[in-house]
Every structure is written in C-alpha cells, then in structure tokens.
Amino acid sequence: MKRFLTLILLSLTLTTSLYAQNEHALRRTIEQLEASIEKEEKELAKLKKNKDSKQRLVNSLASQIEKRNALIAARDKQIKELNRSINNAEKEMGEMSQTIVELEKSCANLSREAYRNYRHNSTLAYIFSASSTVDLARRIASLRSATLHRQAQMNRLAQAREDLEAQRRKLASRRSEVDEVKRKLDKQRKKMRDERDLAKATIRQMSEKERSVQASMSAHEKRLNSAIAELRKITKGNKSGSGFSSATRGLRLPVAGGRVVRYNANTAEILGSKGANVNSIYEGKVVRISRNKINNKYDIYIAHGEYISSYANLSDVCVQQEERVMKNQKIGTIATMVNPSTMNVEYKILFAIHSPNPKVTLKASNLFK
C-alpha cells in the first residue's frame, strides 16, 4: 500500500514538473507576443490620427493581426496544456481517493482488532501466558510492532487526505486559470476582428497604386535576399545536391497539396492547409535556419550545389543546420501569414530559388513545370 501511494505521488510530481516546463516556455512566448502587440498598438494609435498614412496603417494592422493570431494560437495551446494537466490531476485524484478508501478500511480493521483485544483482556492474557522470559520479550515486541504499524497506517491516511485536499485546491486553481485564459482569448479574437475590419475599410479607401504596393511581399523578399548574399559565400564549392541547375524542371511544390497564388521572378507565394508539410524541392544541405523571436516562425535555406532554395514562414522545423536532406523530404510545417489584400489569416510560405550568380534571376515558376 505504501509503495502504491509513493508511486502515485511520484507520478504526480513528474507530471507537474513536465507541465511546469511547458508552461514556463509557453508563458514566455505569450509575454513576448503581448509586449510586441502593446508596442504596435501605440504605433497604430498614432497612424490612425494621420490621414495621409493609409498604407503604413494597413501594413501595421497586417503585422498586428499576424502577431495577435500567433498569440491566439499560443493561448489555445495554453488551454490545451491546462486541460491536459486537469485531466491528469483528476485521474491521479481518483487513484488517491481509492488508496484512501483502502487505507481507511485497513485502519478500521486495525482499530476493531485493537478494541477487541482490549475489551477481552486478550493483550494481558497474551503477555502473561508467555512460556519464558525470551517468549515474553518476543510477545511484547510483537505488540509494540502492531501498535507502531497501526500508528503508521493512521499517519499515512492523514497524509493521503492532506495530499488529496492540496490536489483539489490546485485543480480548482487550474480550472480558474482556464476560465481566465479563455476570457483573454475571446478579447484577443475580438480585437483581431476589429483590426481586420479597420484594415479592410482602409484598403477600400486606398488608390489602385497604393493597393498594388500593399499587396506586394517586398518586405519578405528583401529580408531573404539579404540573407542570400551572405550564404552565397558559404555555399561556394558545395557538392551536396550539385545535380541541380538552372535547367532543372518538373519538381514538386514545396508545400504538400499546396498551390501557387503569386509568382514574382524568383519567388513564389504558396498557399496550403493547416498542418501541411513543407518539403525540400531537391536534395541538398541545410545551410541556415533562422527564427523570428516575436512570432516564433522559421526560415530555412538549403544549398543544392551552389544554388540556394529558401522557405520562409514555417511554424516548426524538423531538420538541423548542416544536415543533408533528400528530395521531397519534410523540413517543417506551414505557418500563418496575413493576406495584405483581404487581411485574412492564411497558411502559406514564401519560396524562392537563388542562383550562385547574384546578377542572374531564376524564375520560380519554371521549376514546377
């Protein structure tokens, strides 16, 4: 019985420790997102007063919607973790309750036995009927052992009841925390809807030229091109995936089940579904994995010989830097991105292919013909 109770408490401790680690990381992500959103809200307040900054306002709203969506996803994950903790706690409480029932039965039996012995003077009879001094000492020791055992069982029962009550309080706290997180989640969703409505209204007021600029992915492309300039030095002379060339055709899209919604020279904006795999278009070597600390999204760069393919906006990665990957091998999972024209949150990546010669631009559209 003691061992069984110890195992329950050990399981509870391990589960609590694991949850605490996950909770700490999740809370840190949420705090970073909330701080970034608060900062962005101050900038938005200034832009709303400036009637000549429609494009900047829409860009800021798109960024804010993206961050708020990431915060909502983190809150959803937090609720799942809390509910899992609650389910584990309820299961462990059931086991602890069963242990308490068994301890209560054991203690009741021991108490009845002790009372029966006392009432019938069987204890004295047991002692005085000893056949020798040695037998007397043995019988006294046996009675003392029985008393200590009974006391130990009572102590274990008392401790088990205290542990159960502590678990009940913790469970109530977790349930209250879930309610609070849900309240915050609803508040974030409402704010995101309001920001989306404001962005759509602002876009309708913009000129055709302004809309064209707004719909571009120039910010992402500039960031990728800046990284490629550095990576060309690293990939010079790379042999992994050297079969790739500017003449390579007929490759699969990097997003499983995806479709291209925009081509622009060497880049392709590829739409997919939630949880879709992002795959390497060709065999090669992972030369860089970078991460946005605000929204936790990843960019991956893979060298195919001296050519480089880049995959921006992944929610997670399953490869490591310097790792060799095969053609169509999964490298990560698609993440969300705000559509700058509709302000809707979509699942998509920005794919690009880069020549070893910075003066040569390869058309991404040619790869998948």
Image (cartoon, rainbow, N blue to C red):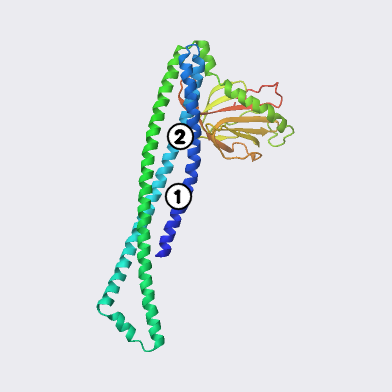
Mark 1, Cα crowd under 10 Å, few <14 / some 14-19 / many 20+, is some
Which residue is label 2 attached to? 73
Residue 109 image position (x, y, % from top left): 30, 70
Rendered view: 82 above or below 62: below
Report the front residue among 12 and 262.
12
Q: Amino acid at mark 1?
A: Thr
Q: Report which quarter residue 122 is drawn in.
A: bottom left
Q: Is residue 189 visible?
A: yes
Q: Residue at x 51, y 15 (%)?
A: 55
Q: Nearer the viewer, residue 1 or 239?
A: 1
The secondary element bearing badge 2 is classed as: helix
Q: Quadrant of the C terminus?
A: top right
The residue at the far right in this view is 237
Instruction: Give whichever of 267, 63 is nearer the camera.
Output: 63
Task: Identify the mark at residue 355; answer none if there is no mark.
Answer: none
Neighbor class of circle 2 (other Cα within 10 Å; few <14, some 14-19, many 20+) is some
Which is closer to the viewer, label 2 or label 1? 1
Q: Which residue is mark 1?
A: 16
